[in-house]
Amino acid sequence: MKGNVWEIVRKEDGTFEMFHKGELLHGSIPDRWLEDQLVRYGFCGEEYRDIRRQLDQFGKAKIVL
């Protein structure tokens, strides 16, 4: 059984893909909608800022709960 793993990946076109447990939940999320999508799944405040830092630094973010 896979753990509760979330991944957000920046694509070459600047949009994002969101995965949960290795399965694609959303593809081609525009930057301006990313925060809203993350908030839908409970990632807000400091969690959102940490995800943004990872995306800015590495182009992807991984969250293990």
Image (spheres, rainbow, N blue to C red):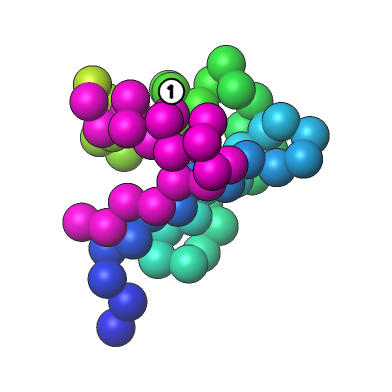
Among all residues in the image, which is located at the extreme top?
32
Stretch in magenta: 46-65
Q: Does residue 31 lie above or below 5 as drawn?
A: above
Apparent side of residue 25 relative to residue 43 in the rendered image (left or right): right
Apparent side of residue 20 relative to residue 16 in the rendered image (left or right): left
| Secondary structure, magenta segment, majority class | helix
- Numbered-mark total: 1
Is there any visible trace of residue 26 in the rendered image?
no
What residue do we see at 33% from left, 61% from top?
Answer: 5
What residue do we see at 58% from left, 42% from top?
Answer: 59
Apparent side of residue 47 relative to residue 35 in the rendered image (left or right): left
Quadrant location of the C terminus in the rendered image: bottom left
Comparing 10 with 42, the one in front is 10
Quadrant location of the N terminus in the rendered image: bottom left
Is there any visible trace of residue 45 in the rendered image?
yes
Q: Quadrant of residue 44?
A: top left
What residue do we see at 33% from left, 25% from top?
Answer: 49
Q: Quadrant of residue 27?
A: top right
Q: Quadrant of residue 14?
A: top right
Q: Does residue 17 lie above or below 52 as drawn?
A: below
Please tell me how crowded label 1 is: few (under 14), some (14-19), or many (20+) other residues with Cα within 10 Å: some
What residue do we see at 77% from left, 40% from top?
Answer: 12
Whether 48 is among the magenta residues is: yes
- State the residue position of label 1: 35
Residue 33 at x, y percent in the picture: 54, 21
Comparing 55 with 32, the one in front is 55
Residue 40 at x, y percent in the picture: 34, 32
Amino acid type indicated by mark 1: Glu
Residue 41 at x, y percent in the picture: 31, 38
